[in-house]
Image (tube, helix red, strand yellow):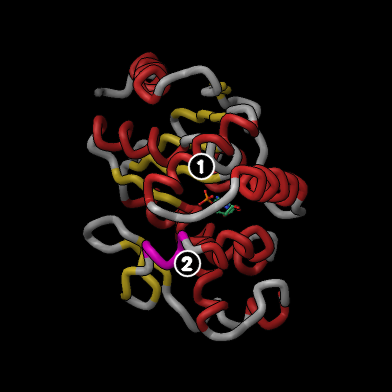
Amino acid sequence: MKYHAIAIDGPSSSGKSTIAKIVAKKLNYLYVDTGAMYRAFTYACLKNKIDPKNEKESIKLIDKIEIDFNKENNVTLDGIDVSKEIREKEVNDNVSYISTYKDVRTHLIEAQRKIAYNHNVVMDGRDIGSYVLPFADVKIFQVAEVNERAKRRYKENLAKGIECSFEEILENLKKRDYIDSHREYSPLKRADDAITIDTTYMSIEEVSNNILKIIKEKGINI
Ligand code: DC
């Protein structure tokens, strides 16, 4: 491949996006948040009054909308920045259903591959190393214990002024972990050649330095 790709996969709230952004900045690569694309499609369904649990109705929308990233690297739906809307509770509660649909995955995976064929990327998601970019130069599988992930998400929400209960977050994470790793098409799975990093007891700096070291050892210029 002409361009380099770093794949960072793992369960919800394992800190992938924080780390991927740091690594992308350090390498001067494009950061691609694939979860934001599934979220944007979920938001599109809700906006069009389609029940995201209804596969037949949801997939009808896939050829009618355009999901992309703008110059600020924020996700767009038909050219409009929806980066705030995709973090709302209704999207959180429904995105796991939407991301089980084969037609949705095929469509978004094609878009993700197109970006990677034209840029150096750090791409985060669930299936990047195992399915979307099997030839990625470096594959990281980033995990953390579910209680620690819930704690992080809870703190994040409080800082953003979002009201929530810790138990609700914990339950939502467990449910999403289950759906993400048990779906039929490209589930959350560690690629055979991925390096697992357990971030439960690590700081953000430790994780990013660790990954940058792995990238350097692969002979990629930093
Ligand atoms: O990373 P995130 O929490 O923003 O992702 C939202 C949802 O999208 C997540 O529950 C699973 C799905 N997803 C996926 O199925 N495949 C990806 N490559 C990225 C996200």
Is ligand 1 less than 8 Å from the beta carbon at label 2?
Answer: no
Disc 1: CA contacts within 10 A as few (<14), some (14-19) or many (>=20): many
Q: Taking 64 as reference, is 83 left or right?
A: left
Disc with the residue nearer the chain's start (2 vs 1): 2
* Residue that label 1 marks: 153
Check the image and report above or below for 54 versus 13.
Answer: below
The residue shown at (62%, 61%) is 93
* Residue that label 2 marks: 40
The residue shown at (38%, 40%) is 122
Residue 187 in view in this figure: no
Quadrant containing the C terminus is: top left
- Residue at disc 1, secondary structure: helix
In the image, residue 85 lies in the stretch drawn in magenta: yes
Is ligand 1 less than 8 Å from the beta carbon at label 1?
Answer: no
Question: Which residue type carries mark 2?
Answer: Ala
Q: Magenta region: which residues?
A: 83-87
Q: CA distance from mark 2 to mark 1?
A: 20 Å
